Amino acid sequence: MKTMILSVGGSIVAPEFPDCDFLKSFVSTVKDFLAKNPENRLILVIGGGGPARIYQKAFREVTGTAAGSGADAADWIGIMATRLNAQLVKASFGELCAEPVVTDPTAATEFTGRILVAAGWKPGFSTDNDAVLLAEKFGGSTVVNLSNIEKVYTDDPRKNPDAKPLDTISWADFCKMVGDEWVPGKNCPFDPIASKKASSLGLKVICAGGKNLSNIRAILEGQAYIGTTIG
């Protein structure tokens, strides 16, 4: 079967609380795609979103830990938020997702259903990295990174009005843009550690808006789409 990987940003699943309207539509879209494409199966890697940020902020306020310090503790808090979100997504797909939520991508061996749901692994690694490792393990060639941005920009468009959206970018240029260090809660299109690994594996990553369900369907079906192709 053809395996496709979706790294679903936590800000899409739970911007603060779970977005039930989106989740209903997302689940329906995925189920319909799988019903019409029996040769496909999907891996969904779920981020921490608002709950991760809220609890990491609480940790820093309670302990007086400055941003950038206490990285392991903050990372574990974010990881637990991804696991809660992932459990919700798994439960929403019912019998299509036969295996438990994957929390260690290097130990995952079973994929008997049509959907496999994964969450955060351990400090120092984002869910983007988990998606890349699962692509390697289960033979996926493309990771679709769904977030709250439709395309990768040359710079942060919120800070630089001259930033330009990109349709395509090489791994070499993208890695220069995002640097080489992962920090819990870092806001970038695709995490630097995951980018290095994806580049070494020759993977393609598509960055696209997570709320545009018709566009997600177009990506899954190999049609024209709005987004940025890396690699």
Image (tube, rainbow, N blue to C red):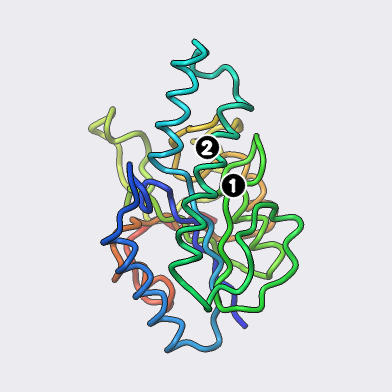
The image quarter in which residue 36 lies = bottom left
In the rendered image, residue 43, in percent from the top left (x then y), is placed at: 56, 66
Please give the name of the residue rendered at 51% of the width and 47% of the height, measured from the top-left corner: 82
Please give the name of the residue rendered at 49% of the width and 22% of the height, measured from the top-left corner: 59
Question: How many marks do you count on the picture?
Answer: 2
Disc assigned to residue 78: 2
Q: What label does residue 96 carry, if any?
A: none
Residue linked to disc 1: 120
**Which quadrant, please, contains the C terminus?**
bottom right
Q: Is residue 142 left or right of residue 33?
A: right
Q: Amino acid at mark 1?
A: Gly
Between 187 and 94, which is closer to the camera in this rendering? 94
User: Which quarter shows the N terminus?
Assistant: bottom right
Circle 1 — which element? loop
Q: CA distance from mark 1 to mark 2?
A: 8 Å
Name the residue located 65 percent from the left edge and 52 percent from the top edge.
103
Q: Using residue 231 as the reference point, say whether residue 213 is left or right of it.
A: left
Q: Position of residue 25 (x, y in %)?
A: 30, 69
Q: What percent of the width, then of the height, locates residue 170?
A: 52, 50
Relative to 90, does residue 182 appear above or below in the rendering? above
Q: Residues within 10 Å of mark 2 (few under 14, many from 20)?
A: many
In the picture shown, does residue 23 fall above or below 78?
A: below
Q: Residues within 10 Å of mark 1 (few under 14, many from 20)?
A: many
